[in-house]
Amino acid sequence: MVRSIMLVGVGGQGTLLASRILGNVLQSRFDVKISEVHGMSQRGGSVVTYIRYGDKVFSPVIEKGQADMIISFELLEAARWMSYLKAGGELITNTQRISPMPVITGAAKYPDGIEDKIRAAGIKLTAVDALSAAEKAGSAKAVNVVLMGVMSKLHDGFDKELWEKAVEACVPAKVLDINRRAFELGREMV
Amino acid sequence: MSKLMLGNQAVARGLYEAGVSVVSAYPGTPSTEITEEASKYSPDELYCEWAPNEKVACETAVGASIAGARSFCAMKHVGLNVAADPLFTASYTGVNGGMLIAVADDPGMHSSQNEQDSRHYAIAAKVPMLEPSDSQECKDYTIAAYELSEKYDTPVILRLTTRVSHSQSAVSESDRADIKLKEYKKDIAKNVMVPANAIKKHVIVEERTRLLTEYAEDCPLNRTEENGADIGVITSGICYQYAKEALGDSADYLKLGLINPLPIKLIKDFAAKHKTVYVIEELDDIIETHCRKIGVDVVGKEKFTYLGEYFQSSIKRVILSEEDEYTDFPEPVPVRPPVLCAGCPHRGVFYILNKLGVTVSGDIGCYTLGSAAPLSAIDTTVCMGASISGLHGFNKGRRGEYEGKSVAVIGDSTFIHSGVTGLINIAYNRSNSTVIILDNSITGMTGHQNNPANGKNIYGDPAAAVDLEALAHAVGIDSVRVIDPNDLSAVEQAIKEELNKPEPSVIIARRPCALLKSVKHKPAFKIDPAKCKNCRSCMRIGCPALCWGESHVTIDSTLCVGCGLCSQMCKFDAIEE
């Protein structure tokens, strides 16, 4: 069996680092493929990383109706990508809002009640304030590692030590303490 | 023990293991990480450099190969257009040390200005081309390419696509092969392509293609997977993975790793065993056309598109008539296009250009985002360097009518790549054109590579830096000035003055990229709600850190880097440090 996870967010939020941590954990037991977006979208655009794992993975890409789990780094992105979940799929989102340029210029409105509307669609949603937790850990940039903490708790197939080692292996040494705290705070949120 | 690697990282590992000793490249998504990763190995073993452009990179690899070293160059698809000149003749000279060119296509145009299919180049230049489908194959094919290159005396192209380059999968590592530098002997008949020699070499090139076609019939790079199915699929690269995902064991596969030249008997034999044969290939109908040419009936582009990426669902839809079900968010979700970053030093220039209503000839880089609303400042973007030469042509075409109201904008790295030749043309063939070099001291869009204008080489060591002011003077531009793009009134004054001069001019807008680690940021600015009239003047600079609320504008303190541009826009002094 192959499982499909997506990390979605805004370019610059650190989805690539989070996918490295997740890949590091999954690789201990599974065949893994991770597909990333580099280049132009990283400049504040909507970004997505696909992670697929199982006995044998072929395609590195996930399409609409195929994901088991989506971890969204920003609320509007949760709405944008929710159609990628299959029936019974699960969504974890950061409640942080980052306005896209059409909202900044007033050409579009940031939708209200996103969490309720996602739940009304029958999706299992976990919403957390990862930004506050990251700031508490010492840096707003640690949102990505807070969310990996949340994921590690909800996705209990892997030992905590394995996750901790993965954080250590993927995060630059000088910000390791902040990220260790961020990971713990993420685990405490759910 | 295997490691998760990006396809690009696995190519770099392959270079290391194949005993390659010279790497030269110009960055370009999705190829950039090959050279970045290769530069992490010791330069004593695997020397790497950023070249000014892809032509120089390719010629450097050609020279290193003639010298007897295994050599490599990498580029994105459009980079191969720039490097096509050396490629076509290196096909004739052949190699001494093995030579590989990696070219990364971008189906779906994630970060590109067109969707060209580089497989045409292998056919046109008559060189072998390999196409891996995952990271392990990226490494294995890289190593295999050097064996082919030296055995058949030819440069080889490794064709990648975004999903192969930027996907991670497991790769097993081996030691570096002990490849000795080959002897260099002067050989005029082989290496001097004057007509008399080239005529003889062309005969050899055609014979080489014949031999490589024979090799393609039973080489380990091409393989069949038999499941006893009625459906046969001929495919290569990432499409193999999509086909396996979609069809599993319900189809048989002919997976082609050597995609130029293509086999004949292998394809005929495979097709003869199947009721229906599909060719699954993104972009152009290269394999399909070959099949038809050799008399094999296949289903190809009449069912599959020439546009974009395929993925598993399009294959399921076409062959199995199956669709995945999903639920959309119940209302429209505002789009989130990429934008110039908060604090980007290009923003001020584009704001002023838009304000003055100037016609802007644009170029390739982060600053192409100056075309997006609300700045909407760019009129044209074609290819690397075209801003400057295009502006000259625009001004010649309109007989000078636009000379006082049009500019070219180009980044420092792009200017070095192929902008300087256009500037020489402006000076030499005299158009009263104004060129703005957006010098942010880095190659930005591809993720911060050093370049010949910023004084550092690929290893971050000090290097000669092109003096842009002196260079502009040296090619014949007398009016050259440097401005700080974050000082809006200075930008406006400089642009107006240079446009009004009866001579060509160069304005260098110099401030380093806000994302560089060496750039110290100021604390986030704040809005004083008592002073803010909610007039939204500040919103006209299109900064992602600004957001308007019901009563006043707010600044996102996690994004703001304190550049102060918005405070220059405010007439009510409502924006404070």
Image: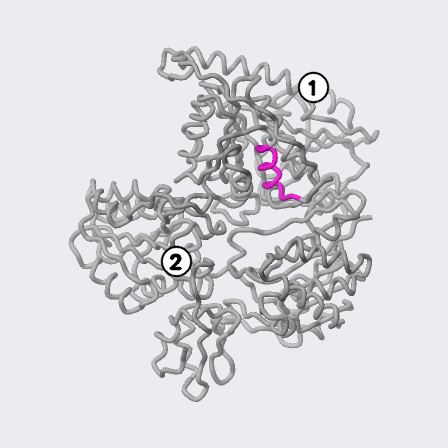
Cβ–Cβ under 8 Å for marks 1 and 2: no
- Residue wearing tag 1: B218
Segment colored magenta: B5-16
Q: Name the residue under label 2.
A: B512
CA gap between label 1 and label 2 equals 54 Å
Residue B371 seen in this snapshot: no
Amino acid carrying mark 2 in the image: Pro
Relative height, residue B134 to residue B331 (above, below):
above
Callout 1: SS: loop
Q: Position of residue B519 (x, y in %)?
A: 43, 61
Q: In this view, does B238 lie above or below B576?
A: above
* Quadrant hosting residue B475: top left
**Front-lying residue, A83 or B192:** B192
**Amino acid bearing label 1:** Asp
For disc 2, the neighbor class at 10 Å (few under 14, some 14 to 19, many from 20) is some
Q: Which residue: 34% across, 66% down? A: B486
